[in-house]
Image: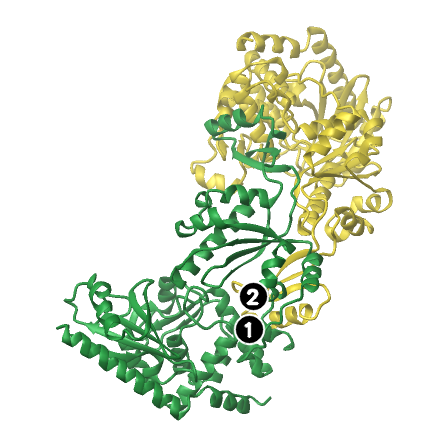
Chain colours: A green, B yellow
């Protein structure tokens, strides 16, 4: 399809209708007023403002998110943000279901009809004198509003939808992608949606974007930030707006942009749903690889999503390095969670069975004490198969491997919850009590009972961005 | 046993008897005279001299080696060394069986009764104005003779025997160890056999020995030579006498010296012979490792030992990196040869069977042309199992492995002789025509028929210096 026509069509679908705009803004203004009055009546001096995509006019149709910020004077005590301010807000909006969130910063999440509402306390500070993590937000809103016109707002929406479609949208830990603010800055910087994609197609190993020219010495700045993508915050020269973007997500954006410009298609914005393999197909796909896919399934009550995903990823790294250290080469890994009851760490390993023999590298021969200890340990050991001897300037011994089967290894290392191998504290109990370790088709019962997981696993096995299918 | 007593006993056994000394020196002098006269009668002006361990009085009892050097004027044409000089010598000593050798430099090897005789042409040059590789030898003889007394000669013999016993004696490529000249220099430098061992026990990653203090800046000199063991030649500051010593042999000397000083035993000088496993024992030892030992056996007529071993080692590296590149992890490797008809490359690999799936790393995503080529190749390929996708900033695809069995791989890569994987030219024909690839007990016929090979393989499987057994 023609690029212009397609963009017009998508923009039309993603721009909120007049009715939506009016309804949401009216509602937001009403909430803002209620919060403001509630605080006033408690004698708290605060500026309550509407921020975020709603204030900037860049939200996607049918996906509004209302961000209400409570800007407090700097004299206000920090511990009271959660203890005093949030309860007042909660009480004033008590007809809505609410959740207190404490990722880095306390805030309130409310569910009002079909709308999600965040109420966030922060400090009203001068630029650069930040006290809490969210004090920059009002400045972000102001900066973006001053730079956007209707055409750019349209293009921000296209970019957000494109990023959602290819799975790189969202700064939360689960995704590790591009925030809404980052989408706005990119659109402002490059001048349009298409120009952003063209630029991203040619992004190099390290990209440095500095809208307000805070840095004269770009090389020094790149060294300072040390990320593959650096977008200097216009309102704070010491902050990289893209610090949450993982290398993989930056890469995905580059390759998707390149593919889209070459062959513009709706699927980039609205990917087809994955149709899970039926069981026989799953089985044949798993078997023909000859690898072993290991699932560690466990349950764990409520953690804030950002905390949960952070810990799941950490646990995944801990397990995969344990597998690698014991000779089971991890080819790929993934984490799945319904953010509620079911969590699954997935590892595809090259070899299910290892031979008994393993190479064990000892100390350099010129370390006399270490050498002695090494010899004492291995020379008359039952498990020594060859050696000790020297190779280059190191001692080496060929010894009997302790774990020939990865499931034995994992059962052993996780029986106490996995603290010893680096599973984070919050997950160890669940690991200890509820874990199931499944290999290949042993996952089929859970697969059949959980369509979301089935989609995820099918996608994992395919292992290919969905838009890639028919592009080349 | 007491160190002093043991050393005395060994010295007694290794010092040639008066009769041997007289007989060998008389014979050497006779040969020297005959060579000298033969050249004179052909009108060639040359100084014929006795060099090497015989001239220095450091040969081991019953192992004399007579080195006769023909020192020619620098005006003599280089190509005539082999073409004119050697035939004259050969003719003058025609009652002996002789072999012309051309490793780096032409020389003649003769077998006279129970003695080996080398006749080596070189140039009579001033120090530093070397023309051929052997011009330094007369200076070496002179230097060593001026530094040794009877006590040091005794200690040189102890050191040589010790190094022979632990398998690090000899600068030839097969061994990659310590030359006789190097033994002499170490003894001179440290002052005695025992002091040499004490020092070697404490050798560090890099050792620098400069008897004549040629270098003021030791750091620079170490960088210049870049070896783990540097012994600056007293007669040539640009030559490292220890350049032939492989890291492993230096390490073995260190650890053996340490063990010997702690527990002095005859076995260090005279190791017990390896008793080959009988077949059932061989079988059980091979099986319990669970690895695969692969033998590439082939035949090849006459090559000078230094050339042969150089090429065998090169072929061994070529094969092992081919195995590694295709996912068969080489744990250990060795080369065996009778230097005549039978040559065997030995590889112990961790895994005999690999799973079909393999990870294939592609180009960085920011290389647009490479990315396109990679996608074109893998996106619709039959052998793609997962992907392509991105990991970090690289493309990656999981694809079907071509070789699941290492023997298939090797048969395929060696069917033309292995030129494509780096088997040296001189061996490719033999590789092509005569190779047999055997796994584990398939070697048993050859093992049973060749006791030397059986010893070697038993030693390989034990994989431990023989003196180590009962030391710790």
> Looking at the picture, how far across and down is residue B327, in whole percent?
67, 50
Q: Which residue is mark 1?
A: A255
Q: Chain of mark 1?
A: A
Q: Chain of mark 2?
A: B
Query: In the figure, residue A57 lies in which quadrant?
Result: bottom left
Q: Which residue is mark 2?
A: B390
Which one is nearer the viewer's eye here, A151 or B16? Answer: A151
Pointers 2 and 1 within a single chain: no
Residue A117 as seen in the image, left or right of residue B212: left
Location of residue A83 with respect to A401 vertically, above or below:
below
Cα separation between marks 2 and 1? 9 Å
Location of residue B405 with respect to B197 vertically, above or below:
below
Location of residue B159 with respect to B331 vertically, above or below:
above
Circles 2 and 1: CB atoms closer than 8 Å: yes
Query: In the figure, residue B369 lies in which quadrant?
Result: bottom right
Which one is nearer the viewer's eye here, B70 or A268? Answer: A268
> Looking at the picture, how far across and down is residue A74, in whole percent?
17, 68
Residue B126 can be seen in this image: no
Task: Identify the residue shown where x is 26% and y is 71%.
Answer: A90
């Amino acid at each position: 399809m023609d690029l212009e026509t397609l963009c017009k069509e998508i923009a039309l679908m993603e721009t909120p209708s007049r009715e939506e705009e009016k309804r949401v803004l009216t509602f937001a203004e009403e909430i803002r007023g209620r919060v403001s009055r509630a605080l006033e009546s408690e004698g708290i001096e605060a500026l309550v403002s509407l921020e975020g995509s709603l204030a900037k006019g860049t939200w996607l149709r049918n996906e509004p998110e209302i961000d209400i910020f409570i800007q407090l004077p700097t004299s206000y005590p920090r511990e009271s943000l959660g203890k005093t301010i949030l309860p007042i807000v909660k009480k004033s909006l008590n007809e809505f279901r609410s959740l207190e969130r404490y990722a880095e910063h306390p805030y309130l999440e409310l569910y009002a009809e079909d709308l999600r509402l965040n109420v966030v306390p922060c400090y009203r500070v001068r630029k650069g004198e930040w006290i809490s993590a969210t004090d920059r937000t009002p400045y972000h809103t102001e900066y973006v509003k001053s730079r956007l016109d209707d055409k750019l707002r349209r293009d921000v929406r296209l970019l957000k939808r494109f990023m959602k479609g290819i799975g790189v949208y969202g700064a939360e830990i689960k995704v590790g992608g591009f925030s809404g603010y980052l989408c706005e800055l990119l659109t402002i910087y490059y001048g349009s949606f298409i120009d952003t994609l063209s630029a991203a197609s040619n992004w190099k190993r390290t990209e440095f974007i500095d809208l307000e020219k805070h840095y004269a010495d770009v090389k020094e700045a790149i060294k300072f930030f040390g990320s593959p993508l650096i977008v200097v915050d216009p309102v704070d020269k010491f902050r990289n707006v893209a610090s949450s973007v993982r290398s993989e997500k930056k890469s995905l954006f580059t390759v998707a942009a390149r593919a889209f410009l070459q062959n513009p298609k709706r699927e980039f914005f609205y990917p087809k749903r994955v149709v899970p393999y039926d069981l026989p197909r799953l089985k044949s796909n798993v078997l023909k690889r000859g690898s072993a896919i290991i699932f560690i399934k466990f349950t764990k009550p409520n953690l804030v999503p950002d905390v949960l995903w952070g810990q799941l990823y950490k646990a995944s790294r801990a397990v995969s390095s344990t597998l690698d250290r014991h000779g089971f080469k991890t080819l790929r890994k993934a984490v799945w969670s319904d953010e509620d009851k079911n969590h699954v760490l997935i590892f595809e390993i090259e070899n299910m069975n290892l031979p008994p023999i393993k190479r064990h590298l000892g100390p350099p021969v010129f370390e006399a004490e270490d050498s002695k200890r090494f010899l004492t340990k291995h020379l008359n050991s039952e498990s020594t198969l060859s050696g000790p001897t020297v190779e280059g300037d190191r001692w080496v011994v060929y010894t009997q491997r302790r774990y020939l089967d990865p499931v034995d290894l994992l059962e052993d290392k996780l029986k106490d919850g996995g603290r010893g191998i680096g599973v984070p504290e919050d997950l160890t109990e669940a690991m200890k009590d509820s874990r199931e370790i499944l290999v290949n088709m042993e996952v089929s019962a859970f697969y059949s009972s959980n369509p979301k997981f089935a989609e995820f696993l099918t996608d994992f096995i395919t292992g290919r961005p969905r838009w890639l299918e028919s592009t080349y």
